[in-house]
Image (cartoon, grey):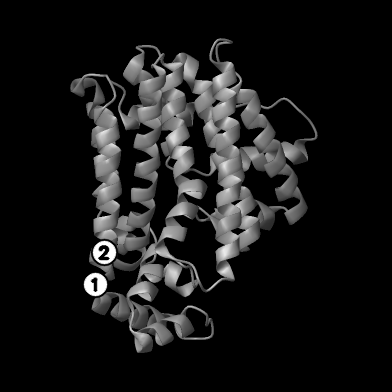
Amino acid sequence: MLSFEKAQEIINREIESLVINREPVELYKPVKYILSIGGKRIRPALVLMACNLFSDTITHAIKPALAIEIFHNFTLLHDDIMDNSVLRRNRPTVHEKWNQNVAILSGDVMSILSYRFIGDCSAEILPDILDLFTTTALEVCEGQQYDMNYESRNDITGDDYIKMITLKTSVLIAASLKLGAMIGGASHTDSDFMYEFGKNLGIAFQIRDDLLDVYGNTEKFGKKIGTDIIANKKTYLILKALEEADDESGKILRKLISTKNIDPEEKITTITGILNRLGIREIAELESKEYYNKALRAFDLVTVNSKQKKSLKDFVKQLMEREK
């Protein structure tokens, strides 16, 4: 069975050799740039791995997998504009390297290119593939809008957050797995189970990321701890803390997450202390584990033998067991 590392290698090689023979070059240079600066390639690799569960041949899944990666990077490019981010994977963001207008237009062309690549499927399944991809694209945009809406609202709950990350993050993981399964010849039932597998994994992974931002090992996690706290992001941990806090702790927490002019280390220390007192780490870990187990139950229902499932199951386990 195809390992994640092998699938990742295939995707990286395809991206490196990608040629877009169109002009003006100023429109397409940022596309090549954003695709070339790295990334884990998790989503397109999942397309190939899911296809390989049902088919010995994955060649016909490569271009659709690239479509997923191009679309994902399009969303990152526009996210960077909305977030005023100056770096992406330790390199200048497109709007910093060029300008905002170039970034918007190049992002637009990436979304269109993704449809060109997703259309490289057999005519028999293409209508279903396009329906899945279009629905997912709409949901990702809806999730981003919810995320923006939540920035200015003070009544957001943990359940609201789950709804938002389901749309913004997990549906693309779910679609990647279902897409690969469909291309590999899976039944409708198995394809739906693969989607549920991915959707619940995506939620589990995001809550896990929220945990790692506060409790992670900087060297192993790959980024500085507490960046979400400094940025006043309403993560699952913060929202659960607001639900669980007494009046005094809630007042302090609300003040801290609405204030920027405060020493970052003091802010991280104070908020982490509140989270610890309320047992939020344990609550979030349990929630993440529940979604992970729900994902595995869906995967267990897929009618492929356990030996074939091993590579994919090992990979998602590795993601869930990242160092804190």
Left or right: residue 4 versus residue 169 is: left
Q: Position of residue 37 (x, y in %)?
A: 53, 44
Q: Quadrant location of the C terminus?
A: bottom left
Q: Examine the rendering and report whether any part of residue 41 can be seen.
A: no
Of helix, strand and loop, which one carries label 2? helix
**Amino acid type of disc 2?**
Ile
Q: Quadrant of residue 56?
A: top left
What's the distance in space between the residues labelled 1 and 2, CA to CA?
A: 7 Å
**Quarter where residue 241 is shown:** bottom left
Residue 31, above or below 258: above
Q: Position of residue 142 (x, y in %)?
A: 59, 49
Q: Is residue 133 above or below residue 252?
A: above
Q: Position of residue 278 (x, y in %)?
A: 26, 76
* Residue identifier under label 1: 279
Query: How crowded is the residue under tag 1: few (<14 C-alpha within 10 Å), some, or many (20+)?
Result: some
The residue located at (45%, 19%) in the rendering is 182
Label drawn at residue 283: 2
Residue toward you, 26 or 126:
126
Contact (Cβ within 8 Å) of mark 1 with mark 2: yes
SS category of the residue bearing label 1: loop
The residue shown at (36%, 89%) is: 248
How busy is the neighbourhood of tag 2: few (under 14 within 10 Å), some, or many (20 plus)? some
